[in-house]
Amino acid sequence: MSISNEQAQAYWRENLRIIMTHLAIWFVVSYGCAILFVEQLNEIPFFGFPLGFWFGQQGSIFVFVILIWTYVFSMNKLDEKYDVHE
Amino acid sequence: MSLDVLTFLFVGGSFALYIGIAIWARAGSTKEFYVAGGGVPPIANGMATAADWMSAASFISLAGLVSFIGRDGSAYLMGWTGGYVLLALLLAPYLRKFGKFTVPDFIGDRYYSQTARVIAVACTIVISFTYVAGQMRGVGIVFSRYLHVDINTGVIIGMAIVFFYAVLGGMKGITYTQVAQYCVLILAFTVPALFLSAQVTGHILPQIGLGATLDSGMSVLATLDQLSVDLGFSQYTSGTKSTIDIFCLTVALMCGTAGLPHVIVRFFTVPRVKDARISAGYALIFIALLYTAIPGVAGFGRVNLIQTLNGADGSGASYEALKTEAKWFQQWENTGLIGWNDRNGDGKVQYAAGPAFDAKKGKPAFTEERGEYGQRVATNPLTGADFDANKQPFANEVYVDRDIMVLANPDIAQLPNWVIALVAAGAVAAALSTAAGLLLVISTAISHDLMKKTINPNISDKQELLYARLAAIVAICIAGYFGINPPGFVAQVVALAFGLACASVFPAIIMGIFWTRHNSQGAIAGMLVGLVSTMCYMYYFAFGSGTPDQYFLGISPGGFGTVGAVLHIIVGFVVSSMTAAPPKEIQEIVADLRIPRGAAEAHDH
């Protein structure tokens, strides 16, 4: 292991922060928009869809894809910052 | 060319391709057999993961399910894609860094316990077998409809093909075959979806087409709502299940997806930790291509189905006319997946809410006889025409199995024959790719986790490989048996697989990575509580005497894995806190797997 203990802990903390931000969005989009608040959002029309229905069947899937890729890029940057990349 | 010749060419051609790849990519060592030598490029791994994951259920059943239950289907669409976010963020990179072959490897080593390893092996085998049964049945359905062989012969052909490339090629053969299978299945799903969307809405993309406005001035979804309500169904865009039930079902499907051993093991095959994250990203793109098209296919299919069955004026289509204008109706009737019961004796097919036959889910029990119009006769027709005239114009006379929607869609929409043949090849690809991945996981669990790591650690690499191949052969035979004699409860059993993965494997791995202090006692207690509570609940309601009004907080068995996972975490935490911390070297392993560097030399044993 080339990095010190403190650095490893700092890396892990930043990693956890990135994970939590992404999971918060993941939760809001799928459980929030498409399940808990679906009725309220369905009042809003969105390109021919009721908005809540759109989130459940289309929107959340698009957001999931974007989330994984932003996570990949943030982690690649973080790995370089702490010099733990391969 | 006739449909039969085309189907034969498409399915046969794809088989030849898979076998060719299998011969090219034979496995020589256990490392190649288990994890393809650990050198698969991320984009190829992404495609292979997508094919591995998208089974007969995704390809054949999901659009049909959404088509029939409308908005409640969102739980499956989100559950089976959102799980990849969990995989990419919480599991894949760390498990890759850990650098072993299997899920029981991780659980056994992290919790320094053979008991934990054996529990994980048991979960892996149960989850994978329940899944495989469904795949073989999917192959059987396709063969019986398009190649006019009976379901049993179809299953045996499918077994032979999987046997050939899974046993010979191991993970290496499977990975490259799955890349080819992904290409076949995505083409086979997308082409008819584009045709359908263009035909119904004028927009080529089904993702946009579903929101389009039709000639009548109403949007597709408003039309669907209207048609559904007129026939006594609930609105397409509103749900019928309670919020808590949908919530728990979605959690169980997401965590279950992330905990499925055959999906997790795919991330052991890439060279670096970084590649594990990237593969998850590619995998979800490839999966989303199909999943975002599903709601469109479901919606257009529903409109076409209702309009064909109830005729242009909505009063019913005559069976005689359907025999020539919509041949698919009688063809599917011949396979037993459609049934017609002329309750009012007018010779017309009428489709509305409610069962047409007297059985669970309204399924007809056919005899060999034919009725006055040539329709199949069932022993359990509902007689009389009692229905709520305020809600629907006539009593329902039709049974349509949800599973036929994707396969019948091109027929219903009268698309060219080559599209229908392509769909058949795609459905077989989807079923075979998943079956192969599952069989590999089962054989690895037996040869590696049970033989090598538990019973006899002294066996050589060569012997282990032999055990792996023998286990694969036995697993294929058992899977084939289930395909030929499908248990009548496939749907419940698949729900069980997700529930178990969600309540046992998923929390054990997450806690092992994110909580250094978690020890073997906590993990074992947690896994057992999650496993036993979920199994008992599902058993009681699926096979026992349970009725829906007894549901715990209104949660159906499919969503109970979520409660099991919560119990697992609580019990695991309490037991762990009351017992000694794990040994220092284990804590060091956990610290090490959090740092990406150093995974390149994947440790062998």
Image (cartoon, rainbow, N blue to C red):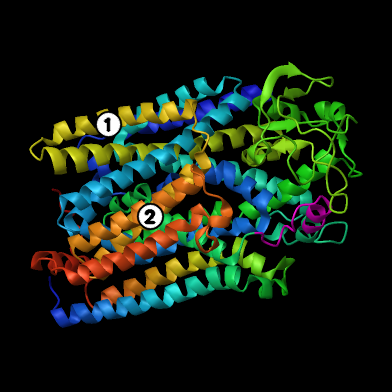
Q: Where residue A9 sits in the image (x, y, percent)?
A: 21, 79
Specify the amino acid type for callout 1: Ala
Q: Where residue B158 sits in the image (x, y, percent)?
A: 46, 27
> Would you say B69 lies left or right of A15 here?
right
Task: Classify mark 2: helix, strand or loop.
Answer: helix
What is the crowding at mark 1: few (fewer than 14 residues within 10 Å), some, or many (at least 20)?
many
Q: Which one is earlier in the sequence, the residue at label 1 or at label 2?
A: 1
When asked about the image quadrant of residue B318, the answer is: top right
Q: Which residue is drawn at 18% across and 60% down?
A: B520
Extent of the magenta region: B225-240
What label does residue B471 carry, if any?
Answer: 1
Q: Eyeballing the image, is B580 above or below B268?
A: below
The residue carrying mark 2 is B533
Assign the N terminus of chain B to one quadrant of the image. Answer: top right
- Residue A52 lies in the magenta-colored region: no
Task: Classify mark 1: helix, strand or loop.
Answer: helix
Q: Eyeballing the image, is B439 above or below B228?
A: above
What label does residue A58 carry, if any?
Answer: none
- Residue B232 lies in the magenta-colored region: yes
Front position in the image: B179 or B333: B333
Q: Where residue B362 sits in the image (x, y, percent)?
A: 68, 38
> Would you say B464 lies left or right of B283 here?
left
When asked about the image quadrant of residue A14, the answer is: bottom left
**Dominant secondary structure of the residues highlighted in magenta in the image:** loop
Instruction: Return the chain for callout 2.
Output: B
Q: Which residue is drawn at 36% across and 63% down?
A: B567
What is the crowding at mark 2: few (fewer than 14 residues within 10 Å), some, or many (at least 20)?
many
Front position in the image: A27 or B419: A27
When asked about the image quadrant of residue A69, the answer is: bottom left
